Amino acid sequence: MEYKKVYLDNSATTPVDCEVIKEMQPYFADVYGNASSFHYFGRESKVVLDNARAKTAKLLNASPEEIFFTGCGTESDNIAIFGPLNAYAKKGHIITSKIEHHAVLYTCKHLEKNGYEVTYLDVDKDGVILIEDFKKAVKDNTLLVSIMHANNEVGAIQPIEQIAQALKKINSLRKDKIYFHTDSVQTAGKLRLDVQKLGVDLLSMSAHKFNGPKGVGVLYVKKGTAVSSITFGGHHESGLRPGTENIPYIVGFAKALEISNDKIEENDKHIFTLREKLKKGILDAISDVIVNGSDSRAVSNILNVSFNYIEGEALLLMLDMHGIAVSTGSACASGTSEPSHVLSAMCVDPAVAQGAVRFSFGHYNTQEDVDYTLHILPKVVSNLRSMSPVWNKKA
């Protein structure tokens, strides 16, 4: 089997769809005005901006005035957390989980150092929080809840609708509303996001996770949610996110979301088939492996596997030499030798967690990609294990 290049790190980022590139192209040089300018060129761009906002809102079952364009998912997360808390102008309690993306976790850690109280909810063996644990965590001074929609390392889908329903009851008995934010960066384009059904006050997204351009995100803010800006400048995005809007990328965001939503069922079926083929192939060909997380409670594009007696980082590097791109966890956490905070929260043994690799699929992946990976992977694992004193002792 000849050398191939196989990209199985789609949870880190995705290639930009050709239709998206085509849609964006005119707004780099032909329609280039600043959407805040009152002259013809500015008005022309403003129409494009408004159309992209309306399209995005419709796809989320929101109103256009509830959609705010940002620079990325991390920025959306930061505004979603700092914004409501700044609007309260008092310190209180925050609830999040131990498996959140660092854009949320590090923000909460920062707030904790500055006088806020934070509860980090545990998860079960599948990486899912328990509703009862959430209900018990709510306090009189709770101001904000931030729970991701699906985890970026194991794909675990969180019970967002049930949390929203519980909060609705709790808020009916309170003076200060507890706002609810969900990081949907890993579910946008993979699950249908209906903000009315989800019941959240704030929702974060990033285009490059669903075949849109890097450098543009969205924050949904439910009408009536008090949010203060965390950056200062002009009046752009109703003052919530000052800075000249990136029209080409915003157009790309809306188009990418439209395309992915149109093909959700088709893409999900294709990706699920690939993931299951890879999983079965790994379990059949390689001993001492553990699949982390659950099939039935996770998005279909992520497969997290621990290969015992080897380091995940070493496996990543060896696969890369054969043209196969994977991850040892979140791309944003690469460069650290610490075990995954997600797997640690799931009570995965540290030695097992060190051997974890995340395979994440996109709709561009093929059966041939999986065949090539299954041709290379067992050999690489065998070679790495042959250098492991622990494996040799076991053998």
Image (spheres, rainbow, N blue to C red):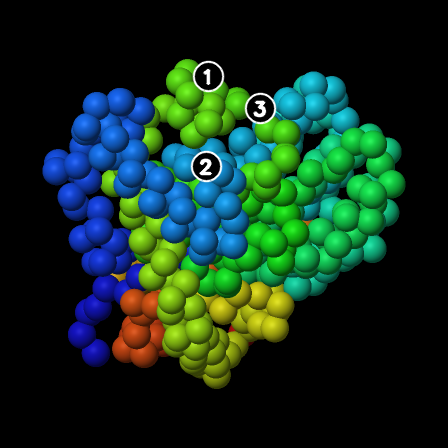
Quadrant housing residue 297: bottom right
The residue type indicated by label 3 comes to Ser
Which residue is pictured at 21% across the width and 68% down the height? Answer: 4
Which residue is pictured at 26% across the width and 22% down the height? Answer: 38
Which residue is pictured at 63% across the width and 34% down the height? Answer: 225
User: Is label 3 in a helix, a strand or a loop?
Assistant: loop
Q: Where 115 sits versus 303, above or below?
A: above
Q: Nearer the viewer, residue 282 or 383?
A: 282
The circle drawn on residue 228 is: 3
User: Is label 2 in a helix, a strand or a loop?
Assistant: strand
Q: Where 109 sits versus 309, above or below?
A: above
Instruction: Tell me which label, 2 or 1, sits earlier in the chain.
Output: 2
- Using the numbered discs, state the Cα–Cα distance from disc 3 to disc 1 in whole angstroms: 10 Å
Residue at the spot of label 2: 68
Residue at the spot of label 1: 232
Query: Which quadrant of the rendered structure holds the C terminus?
Result: bottom right
- Image coordinates of residue 345 in percent, x first then y, are 67, 51
Tell whether 220 sits left or right of 234: right
Q: Nearer the viewer, residue 99 or 374?
A: 99
- Using the numbered discs, state the Cα–Cα distance from disc 2 to disc 1 in whole angstroms: 15 Å
Inspect this view and state whether residue 193 appears: yes
Inspect this view and state whether residue 102 appears: no
